[in-house]
């Protein structure tokens, strides 16, 4: 009997240590509490108008004011300062409880921004913190304006904003088909700048590089989409660029028309440990498993910005076992949210803003616990009444934007911000941002896959 028990426990120990397929594990987490920021919640005193869609983009910008709490930048691409749908962003100086201490607006009329915006540019459709690009001691931003018309209709642009500690713009640099040293070939309707991400220093020259989505690019077919890797100079201009699309950049798997690859982009660090930072890319109208269910691509990069290998995550690929519905648009937003389960591999948050849990288009996000090969080890969904107790309404599109904010409340667990740009607090489609204070992830081991 004693010998049998010894053999049994030796086998169990072997399975756990080797990660054998005879064991399975499920990782779970939940929202400990939440705080909403909107026209009537969360201490926000800025002036929103109907249709602004506050929360269309979110970025954590570090501790801009040096008070020990991370701050946020939030996009309102349909703001009408000085013209229709020119767009704006809000700098939110945060308190540790998820409420806004102070806010500052950057638009065609505010925040000392002297860039030339035009009607329908939709500045603020995407935002990324790019660290201290110009080495002046203050963090800087990249902001997408995907309907900018430099050299053609809706070709798109990205603005580099050099900030001061009060959230004002000290200097700016535009990157478009006409400006900023960008030599890539854009076409009408590409909407370059619809997504933007800090991807670290891919080419190891000491300057942070960017990934920029152009989800309506037509390489290989209508709206298959593309991503541009921008190798940056410290003055905000482009040193070189590399395109990744259906027929460029060594993407070795086929895209389909209307996939909209590039609908979201996120830097994910060096996931596979080869010394080069990697990239997650949303394709929110991918049709795996059903119409417009969506997908996320994990791209393992080379130092020249081409793809070394890739892994697709969708309804039927990448070991993703979540249940997507037609029209969910999984991959509309994606963010690296740190190592929630402390296994040494980062997790992803992926938005599915047209998910119908609780009501039409209320939205959802998925937390993906990752393996370093780009596959999903476990997943959990946060939606209306499903691991999330916030009050969502039909059409809110919770999950249109998502960003990590680090450990805002000081409990040693990373927290998450989620945009719901069609929220109606204070008026129609004024928008909202939710702060999700997360609980510690837990792992349950299931022996022999049972």
Image (cartoon, rainbow, N blue to C red):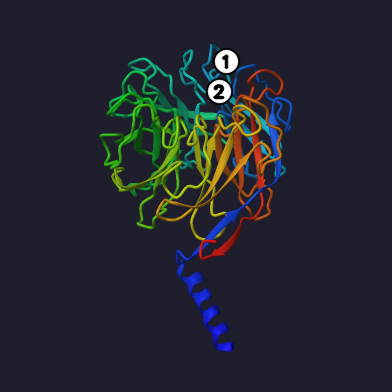
Label 2 SS: strand
Q: Position of residue 266 (x, y in %)?
A: 45, 41
Which picture quadrant has residue 155? top left
Question: In front here: 420 or 132?
Answer: 420
Q: Position of residue 305 (x, y in %)?
A: 31, 43
Residue position for label 1: 81
Does 12 appear above or below 249?
Answer: below
Q: Looking at the image, which residue sits at the far bottom?
A: 2
Label 1 or label 2, whichever comes before in sequence order: 1
For label 1, the crowd category at 10 Å Cα-Cα, with few meaning under 14, some 14 to 19 and many 20 or more, is: some
Q: Is residue 176 left or right of residue 166?
A: left
Q: Looking at the image, which residue sits at the far front?
A: 1
Label 1 SS: loop
- Label count reads 2
Pointer 1 with pointer 2, Cβ within 8 A: yes
Q: Position of residue 425 (x, y in %)?
A: 70, 24
Please report the residue visible at 63 percent of the width from the left and 51 percent of the height from the top: 29
Please report the residue visible at 32 percent of the width from the left and 47 percent of the height from the top: 203
Residue position for label 2: 88
Which picture quadrant has residue 218? top left
For label 2, the crowd category at 10 Å Cα-Cα, with few meaning under 14, some 14 to 19 and many 20 or more, is: many
Structural distance between the alpha carbons of marks 1 and 2:
8 Å
Whether residue 138 can be seen here: no
Whether residue 42 can be seen here: yes
């Amino acid at each position: 009997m004693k010998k049998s028990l010894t053999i049994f426990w030796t086998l169990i120990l072997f399975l756990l240590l080797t990660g054998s397929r005879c064991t399975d594990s499920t990782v779970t987490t939940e929202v400990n509490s939440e705080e909403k920021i909107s026209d009537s919640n969360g201490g926000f005193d800025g002036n929103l108008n109907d249709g602004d869609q506050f929360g269309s983009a979110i970025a954590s910008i570090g501790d801009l004011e040096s008070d020990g709490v991370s701050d946020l930048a939030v996009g309102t691409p349909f703001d009408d300062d000085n013209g229709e749908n020119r767009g704006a962003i809000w700098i939110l100086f945060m308190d540790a409880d998820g409420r806004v201490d102070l806010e500052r607006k950057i638009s065609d009329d505010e925040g000392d921004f002297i860039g030339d915006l035009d009607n329908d540019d939709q500045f603020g459709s995407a935002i990324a913190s790019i660290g201290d690009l110009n080495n002046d001691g203050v963090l800087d931003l990249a902001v997408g304006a995907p309907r900018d018309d430099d050299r053609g209709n809706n070709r798109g642009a990205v603005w580099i904003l050099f900030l001061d500690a009060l959230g004002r713009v000290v200097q700016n640099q535009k990157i478009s088909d006409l400006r900023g040293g960008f030599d890539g070939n854009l076409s009408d309707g590409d909407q370059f700048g619809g997504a933007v991400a800090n991807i670290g220093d891919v080419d190891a020259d000491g300057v942070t590089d960017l990934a920029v989505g152009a989800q309506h690019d037509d390489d290989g077919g209508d709206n298959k989409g593309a991503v541009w890797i921008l190798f940056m100079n410290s003055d905000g201009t482009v040193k070189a660029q590399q395109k990744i699309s259906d027929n460029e950049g060594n993407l070795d798997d086929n895209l389909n028309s209307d996939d909209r690859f590039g609908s979201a982009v996120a830097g994910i660090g060096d996931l596979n440990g080869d010394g080069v930072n990697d990239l997650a890319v949303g394709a929110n109208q991918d049709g795996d498993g059903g119409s417009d269910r969506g997908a996320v691509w994990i791209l393992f990069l080379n130092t020249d910005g081409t793809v070394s290998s890739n892994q697709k995550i969708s309804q039927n690929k990448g070991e993703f076992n979540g249940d997507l519905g037609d029209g969910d648009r999984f991959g509309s937003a994606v963010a690296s949210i740190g190592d929630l389960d402390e296994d040494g591999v980062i997790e992803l948050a992926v938005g599915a803003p047209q998910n119908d849990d609780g009501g039409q288009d209320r939205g959802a996000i998925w937390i993906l616990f990752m393996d370093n090969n780009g596959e999903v080890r476990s997943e959990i969904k946060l939606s209306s009444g499903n691991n999330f107790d916030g009050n969502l309404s039909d059409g809110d599109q919770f999950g249109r934007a998502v960003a990590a904010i680090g450990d805002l409340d000081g409990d040693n667990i990373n927290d998450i911000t989620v945009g719901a740009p069609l929220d109606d607090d204070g008026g129609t489609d004024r928008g909202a941002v939710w702060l999700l204070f997360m609980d510690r992830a837990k792992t349950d081991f299931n022996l022999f896959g049972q």
